[in-house]
Image (cartoon, grey):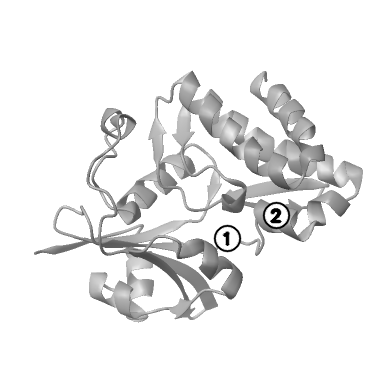
């Protein structure tokens, strides 16, 4: 079965090839395991794995992540999968398209660098993405209790930034099934503001319905409510303000 590849640019292709990452087989051979915390989150699917790899270049090292899938876990698509034409492709293909959709819409995402797949991409593929600047996600901060201990004004601006990303998605009618706190990476920038980076952006599609948006926001809030009930109201208020802009 034939193999295919797609690169973000010729420069990226040269960089990856110089480091041996030139095709699907290499994407399955190269890379190191994630740290214990993130490995536990990234390996809950039996036929998917994520590894990290440091690329060498004249300007220094660049960390990338390789998400692999080598078998489909379900062949029967859900009705919404069919409606949004995301039914059969493997998750690396969806990740590639989802990241590019969100990036083109102006969101900060883990930059998609390359996609490798076999045949029609139904079951075996790998996507390469650049690591985002922050090292901890919103979920990490919640689980460590750092959000709950954060100074009030600093916390408020972080919540406003995170909820604002969700509101922007919904105003643009973009749906993202993996919209979870563990996929939001906050970076504090000068001026007391936050930049939110998004990772694992598979399941993204355009022309989302109001029902899709409500479902995703409800699921996002459930995670917050379960771990920091006192913060839910702040998220709801911030989302409402951003949604009405």
Q: What numbered label is drawn on residue 59? A: none
Residue in view at x 49 percent, y 81 percent: 58
Image quadrant in which you'd find residue 26: bottom left
Q: Answer left or right for 77 relative to 63.
A: left
Residue 23 visible? The answer is no
Q: Quadrant of the N terminus?
A: bottom left
Q: In the image, residue 38 lies at what x, y percent?
A: 56, 66
Q: What separation in Å lies between label 2 and label 1 (alpha carbons)?
A: 9 Å
Residue in view at x 57 percent, y 45 percent: 180
Sequence-wise first label, 2 or 1 = 1
When the figure is inspected, residue 43 is found, relative to residue 147, above or below; the finding is below
Q: Badge 1: few (under 14), some or many (20 or more) residues near its Cα, within 10 Å?
A: many
Residue in view at x 73 percent, y 23 percent: 241
- Report the front residue among 42 and 172: 42
Cβ atoms at labels 2 and 1 below 8 Å apart: yes
Q: In the image, residue 70 lies at what x, y percent?
A: 26, 64
Q: Quadrant of the C terminus?
A: top right
Under circle 2, the secondary element is strand
When the figure is inspected, residue 20 is found, relative to residue 184, above or below; the finding is below
Q: Badge 2: few (under 14), some or many (20 or more) residues near its Cα, within 10 Å?
A: some
Location of mark 1 (residue): 132
Location of mark 2 (residue): 187
Q: Answer left or right for 190 relative to 182.
A: right
Q: In the image, residue 81 lies at what x, y percent?
A: 30, 35
Residue in view at x 57 percent, y 36 percent: 219
Q: In the image, residue 54 lies at what x, y percent?
A: 49, 78
């Amino acid at each position: 079965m034939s193999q295919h590849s797609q690169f973000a640019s010729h420069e990226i292709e040269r960089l990856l090839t110089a480091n041996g990452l030139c095709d699907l087989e290499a994407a399955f051979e190269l890379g190191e395991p994630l740290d214990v915390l993130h490995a536990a989150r990234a390996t809950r699917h039996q036929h998917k794995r994520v590894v990290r790899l440091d690329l060498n270049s004249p300007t220094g090292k660049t960390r990338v992540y390789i998400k692999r899938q080598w078998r489909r876990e379900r062949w029967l698509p859900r009705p919404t999968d069919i409606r949004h034409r995301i039914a059969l492709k493997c998750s690396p293909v969806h990740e590639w398209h989802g990241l590019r959709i969100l990036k083109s819409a102006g969101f900060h995402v883990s930059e998609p660098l390359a996609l490798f797949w076999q045949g029609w991409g139904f079951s075996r593929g790998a996507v390469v993405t650049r690591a985002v600047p922050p090292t901890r996600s919103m979920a990490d901060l919640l689980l460590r209790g750092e959000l709950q201990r954060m100074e009030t004004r600093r916390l408020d601006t972080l919540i406003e930034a995170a909820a604002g990303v969700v509101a922007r998605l919904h105003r643009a009618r973009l749906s993202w099934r993996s919209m979870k706190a563990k996929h939001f990476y906050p970076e504090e920038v000068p001026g007391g503001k936050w930049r939110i980076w998004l990772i694992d952006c598979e399941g993204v599609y355009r022309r989302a319905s109001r029902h899709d948006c409500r479902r995703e926001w409800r699921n996002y809030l459930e995670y917050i409510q379960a771990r920091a009930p006192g913060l839910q109201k702040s998220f709801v208020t911030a989302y409402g303000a951003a949604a009405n802009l």
